[in-house]
């Protein structure tokens, strides 16, 4: 359970960095507290998408992983971020990613920041 909380907080921090760096990834809210709450909810949605959908997409696109030497991972991460944006819209969360290339860059930023935060933050081990 503690590992789940750490990963969710790392995802929320990584999403916050992507929102801060990229103008076309937006998070709106009346107050800082509402924005933090929205970020945590979006991080939960993002974690759920990565847990449920990403493995299926990776299996289906395995030949492309080999053919592109793994660069297709950028596209898969972008698609997961766009799916998260779409789900956030359906759940009435104020998070939006505008465009595929923004999602590619956002996915790269989120991957790097999440990796770094997972190293720094303590987990159950």
Image: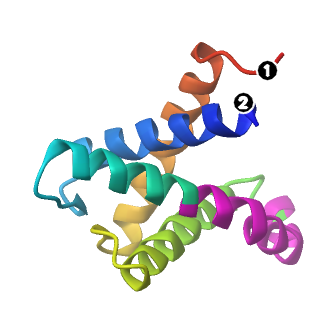
Q: Quadrant of residue 33?
A: top left
Are discs 1 and 2 less than 8 Å apart at CB?
Answer: yes
Q: Which colour scheme is used?
A: rainbow
Residue 2 disc label? 2
Instruction: Label 2: state its secondary structure.
Output: helix
Q: How crowded is mark 2: few (under 14 residues within 10 Å), some or many (20 or more)?
A: few
The part of the chain drawn in magenta is 45-66
* Up-down relation of residue 57 to residue 118 (above or below): below
Against 111, is 90 above or below? Answer: below
Mark sitting earlier along the chain (1/2): 2
Q: In which quarter of the image is the N terminus?
A: top right
Quarter-of-image position of residue 67: bottom right
75 relative position to 14: left or right: right
Does the segment drawn in magenta span residue 53?
yes
Spot the residue most to the left: 30
Q: Where is residue 66 in the image (x, y as percent from the top left)?
A: 86, 60
User: At 16% from the left edge and 59% from the top edge, which residue is drawn?
Assistant: 29
Dot 1 lies on which element? Answer: loop
Identify residue for label 1: 124
57 and 88: which is toward the camera: 88
């Amino acid at each position: 359970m503690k590992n789940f909380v750490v990963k969710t907080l790392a995802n929320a921090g990584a999403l916050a960095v992507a929102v801060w760096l990229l103008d076309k990834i937006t998070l709106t809210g009346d107050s800082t507290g509402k924005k933090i709450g929205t970020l945590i909810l979006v991080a939960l949605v993002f974690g759920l998408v990565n847990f449920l959908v990403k493995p299926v997409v990776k299996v289906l696109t395995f030949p492309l992983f080999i053919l592109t030497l793994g660069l297709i991972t950028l596209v898969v991460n972008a698609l997961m971020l766009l799916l998260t944006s779409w789900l956030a819209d359906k759940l009435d969360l104020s998070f939006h990613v505008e465009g595929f290339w923004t999602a590619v860059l956002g996915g790269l930023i989120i991957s790097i920041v999440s990796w770094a935060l997972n190293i720094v933050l303590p987990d159950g081990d």
